[in-house]
Image: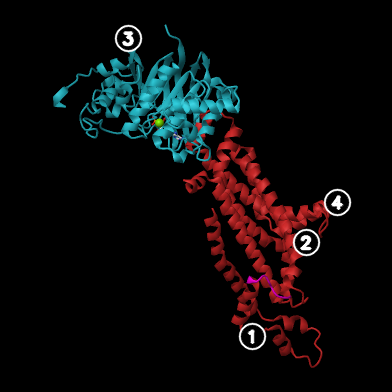
Amino acid sequence: MLRIIVNRLLLAIPVLVGVTLLVFLILHSVPGDPVATFYGMDLAPGDDLEAMRNELGLDRPLSAQYLDFLWQAVQGDLGNSIKTRRPVLQDLSQGVVNTAQLAMASIFIAIVVGMSLGILAAYKAYSIWDNISLSVSLFGISLPVFWIGLLLIWLMSVKLALLPSGGKGDWRNLILPALTLSLASIAVISRVTRASLLEILNEDYIRTARSKGLSGLVIMLRHTLPNGIFPVITVVGLQFGYLLAGTVLVETVFSWPGLGRYLVDAIKFRDYPVVQGGVLIVAVVFVVINLLVDILYYALNPRLRTAERG
Amino acid sequence: MSSRILEVNDLVTRFHTQDGTVHAVNGVSFYLNEGDTLGIVGESGCGKSVTVLSILRLIPEPPAEVARGEALFDGQDLLRFSERELRKVRGGKIGLIFQDPMTSLNPVHTIGSQVSEVMREHLDISREQANRRVLELLDTVGIPDAAQRARDFPHQFSGGMRQRVMIAIALACNPRLLIADEPTTALDVTIQAQIIEQVKSLREQFGMTVIWITHDLGIVAGLANRVIVMYAGFVVEHAAVADLYADPRHPYTIGLLQSLPNLGEDEDERLVSIDGRPPDMLQEPSLCQFLPRCRYAIERCREELPILREVGDGHQVACWSDVRFEPQGQDL
Ligand SMILES: Nc1ncnc2c1ncn2[C@@H]1O[C@H](COP(=O)(O)OP(=O)(O)O)[C@@H](O)[C@H]1O
Ligand SMILES: [Mg+2]
């Protein structure tokens, strides 16, 4: 068990380095730099752009800049925002918390609704319920996030006045963005759940379970689901990644003050440290989620568990 | 006069597949009296499993369709039972063992919980009572160190041991009837013999009635008192086990007996095999299905479907041709 965790964490190092390097290179190959974008707006005559670049260290070789960033990041320092001059971690912390809230709520909805729909579809395969579940999935997967978001705002906030249309407040502000963000994942999770369960239902041990006189529900929940859960866990892990990516759009549509929105702003202003820091945080979260997926796999599979004991 | 436990009449089961309708079981009838062990024999694909699974509705419907017939269990027709009523019978009054012990147990649950589950479903007992009885049962079916092994998972058991677990599950609720569907086919020969001995002794101990399915006539000899021989979804012969061996009356049965290796001879050296292949069962049968492979066919065989007719006391055969088998000894 411990070996798996250590192994995974070691594997994560090249991933994190790779991600930050890629983002770094992309950022620096896009035309424009922070000095030009916002110091450039209200330049006093005599101000020296080069001096400012020098002050920010932007005139040094790219390799030196990147290694500097890495070295500081390892020590837990993501540098200061060029725009606000405050430490990046401090600037991003509220966004991280808000995005985490949104992502957690979304993945929770996606797992509960997606798996329920998938189980229902498998339990009542080829019936009307199966078709209803399929329709919901198609709906969720084919409509663009921003369009669904706007539709929900129009319906729930404008027409019915049930929920706030955006911003950050109590739990009611969370419902619409979380729901919007979860729709595509609901679709994918329900489809994978259904397919996996239907495959398990063909197994010999399911016939054994039926030959014991167990009810359909017990067979589904006690005998089928625990065996069919593994592809679902994998896909939930993957969906979490997509979901994090989706937060950028959803946060914009619902004016949710999350990491995604900060990052979009930071990219506009070429606020290099903020972008790099934000991406690093997202990448770390991603690695941790993948680790959790592996641990879950391990914990739920008696073959792996007992192999270690014996 | 012992009482009738199961009487199956004119059972018809089909599969509606993309390639067409598979006529898997075509009017099968048989019966079991209390204490009987009935052997169902026939080569792979002849409908043995589908026959018994149809009775308990354990085949997937669709594609399967149990189209006709009755299955009187203690006088009540199982084919008219609701799913709820059937559940009481499955595992409660009728226990089943299947062919492949490697895949018949659920990999994520312990052996103990898989045995106790069936008792918790059918018997009114507490968890502790069930757990205690699990240990007794595992002991009874010959699993050493039961207390320890009950906590193990299927992958920690060998094939033979897993089949013993399956037997424990099947017997847990003291069923009146045990259906064993080729329970030893997937096991190697020594383990096979052990399992057969185990079932024999349990049969005495529990006073059970048994249906034993196999494609191996050799196994049936020492185990069953009556045998039905199936071919392409039909019962082609039914006889007391001694009569079947001494006086087989269907060309297919004769072929099967001839292909048995004699005692002491090499297992692999089958003496005679039946030429040709079984039909694909995609046509609704209108003539004897064995006709294309039959050496004894007469004119009438090409005109109408044979029905089971009495040829001796409790000995029936579905064949128009009056074949007698003369054991031919050396010159075979
Ligand atoms: N799920 C299924 N779909 C289509 N055909 C099937 C299915 N199950 C069994 N059959 C067909 O029914 C026939 C009888 O099968 P079975 O009873 O399993 O044979 P066996 O005598 O070996 O137990 C075979 O021809 C098989 O192809
Ligand atoms: Mg079979």
* In this rendering, the label closer to the viewer, 1 or 2: 1
Give the amino acid at mark 1: Arg
Where is residue A79? Give x, y as percent: 70, 75
Res. A183 visible in picture? yes
Gap in angstroms between the C-alphas marked 4 and 2? 19 Å
Subunit of mark 4? A
**Within 8 Å: ligand 1 and the Cβ of disc 1?**
no
Q: Which callout, 4 or 2, points at the residue further toward the start of the chain? A: 4
Q: Are marks 4 and 2 in contact (CB under 8 Å)?
A: no
Residue at the far top: name it: B1
Asked where in the image residue B9 lies, by quadrant, the reply is: top left
Which stretch is magenta? A74-80
Asked where in the image residue B162 lies, by quadrant, the reply is: top left
Residue for point 78% across, 76% down:
A84
Mark 2 = which residue? A256
Same chain check for tags 3 and 2: no
Give the amino acid at mark 4: Ala
Gap in angstroms between the C-alphas marked 1 and 2? 36 Å
Viewer-side residue, B292 vs B171? B171
Res. B208 visible in picture? no
* In this rendering, the label closer to the viewer, 1 or 4: 1
Judged by its main secondary structure, the magenta piece is: loop
Same chain check for tags 1 and 3: no
